[in-house]
Every structure is written in structure tokens, then in C-alpha cells.
Amino acid sequence: MSGLLLWDFDGTLAYHTELWSGCLARILSELGSAGAITSDDVAPHLSAGFPWHSPEVAHPHLGDPDLWWAALYPVFQRAATSLGLHPEHAQRAAERMREEYPAPHRFCLFSDVLPALDTLHAAGWRHVLLSNHTPELPRIVTALGLDSHLDGLIGSAATGFEKPHPAMFEQGRRYARPGEPAWMIGDNYSADIEGAERCGIPAILVRKDHPVAQRQAPDLANLHTLLGKNQT
């Protein structure tokens, strides 16, 4: 049993302790918004405007981190003003999102991740990260101690493509050696599973249930067994 595993990041290997909505809600409260603002208040205002909300649209022009974040500032500013902040404070909130959302200490690995990666590596599998994420993803991965477990990292902020765009999966497939199978592991059925399988890459949905997912697992504990069964 060996091959290449393409891994999603958020929701699969790690999670953000606040999410986008919680991070912005905290910042707005700290900036003196009128009344308490919760992540539930913020979430509807962040349902559009991120690059991965329009994965069919390539964005290589946002390859510079400054440009990537500048494209998101209006999203945060509109959310802030809609929730009662003065425009000047809304601008400050947007700028603080760049500082605070990708801060490595805001991310945590799921407890089963490192044991699973080690078990799979020992069985001959290699690992590549394939993630829709901020430009700071490499720094986050290093801080979490994941970099030493990976053979590569492909982030959408650098490539200009978001899963399920086929270009993302094609970039991941390039890490496969001749004759080596590649699999996708992720928690998002549309972006990770459907996207990979449309490109001919078998996929396993983890941490979530979906009624039509052919292969799924509640966590990573027995992933090596599931991969073994599907290779025989």
C-alpha cells in the first residue's frame, strides 16, 4: 500500500479556534461596536466575496499577499458597517483581520492527525497539502509542526485557483511518481470529493457525512485500513 495523498487543511487536518466570523466578531467588539456582536451576527455578511466562493474564477492577479488581502478588505468593511461600526473603525477591523485571522496560534491540529500521517508514511504513503487558504498557509503549517510530514504544499492564494477548480487537482497530481496512485482526503464534499473525482482522483470524505459519498470515515484513525481495502 503506497501512493500520494492530497490533503485538505481546514476541517481535515486542523481547525481555526474562531473561524472567520468569530474572529471578525471579536475584533468588532474590541473596536467599540454598539452592543455585543457574535459570530452568528457576522456569518451572513461573510457568505460571499472570498475567492473560494467563486472557484470557477481564476485569480492569478492576487498572487501577491498584499493584493490578496486587499481584495478581501471590502468584504470585512461592509460587514462591519452593516453591524453598526463607523467607516473608520470598519477599515481598522479589516486590517486587523489580516493580522489576526492567520495567526498560527489560532489554529489547532486534530488529535488524530500526526499519528495518522506517521502510520500512513510508514506504509509508504507521501503527503501533499492541497488547500483553499490565505497566503500565510506555509507559515501556519510550519508553526503546527506539519511541514516535516509533507512532501509539498499547494495553496490557492499562491496558485490563483480554488478547489474544486481542476487546475488545483492537476497541480497536486504532479507530485505523483510514475505509476503512483493519488488520493484526495478532505471534509468538504463539493470542493474536495466531487472536485477530485471529476479529475479522476479517488477521494475519501472525512469528519463529515454525506449521503452520496462513496468512501467516508468519521476521523483519520482507520484511514490506512480504508485505503488498503480500496487498493486491493
Image (cartoon, helix red, strand yellow):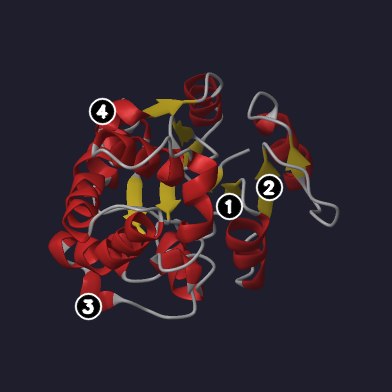
Q: Is residue 117 above or below residue 169?
A: above
Residue visible at 68% across and 47% down in the picture? 204
Marks 3 & 4, CB-CB < 8 Å contact: no
Q: Compare residues 21 and 191 and report the one nearer the observer.
A: 21
Label 1 Cα crowd, 10 Å radius (few <14 / some 14-19 / many 20+): many
Write down the residue under mark 1.
184
* Marks 4 and 1, the one that precedes in the sequence: 4
Q: State the SS at label 2.
A: strand
Quarter-wise, where is residue 141 in the image? top left
Marks 4 & 1, CB-CB < 8 Å contact: no
Write down the residue under mark 2.
204
Q: Is residue 198 left or right of residue 32?
A: right
Write down the residue under mark 3.
61
Q: CA distance from mark 3 to mark 1?
A: 27 Å
| 4 vs 1, front mark | 4
Residue visible at 35% across and 44% down in the picture? 24
Residue visible at 29% across and 52% down in the picture? 85
Q: State the SS at label 4.
A: helix
Q: Is residue 98 left or right of residue 132?
A: left
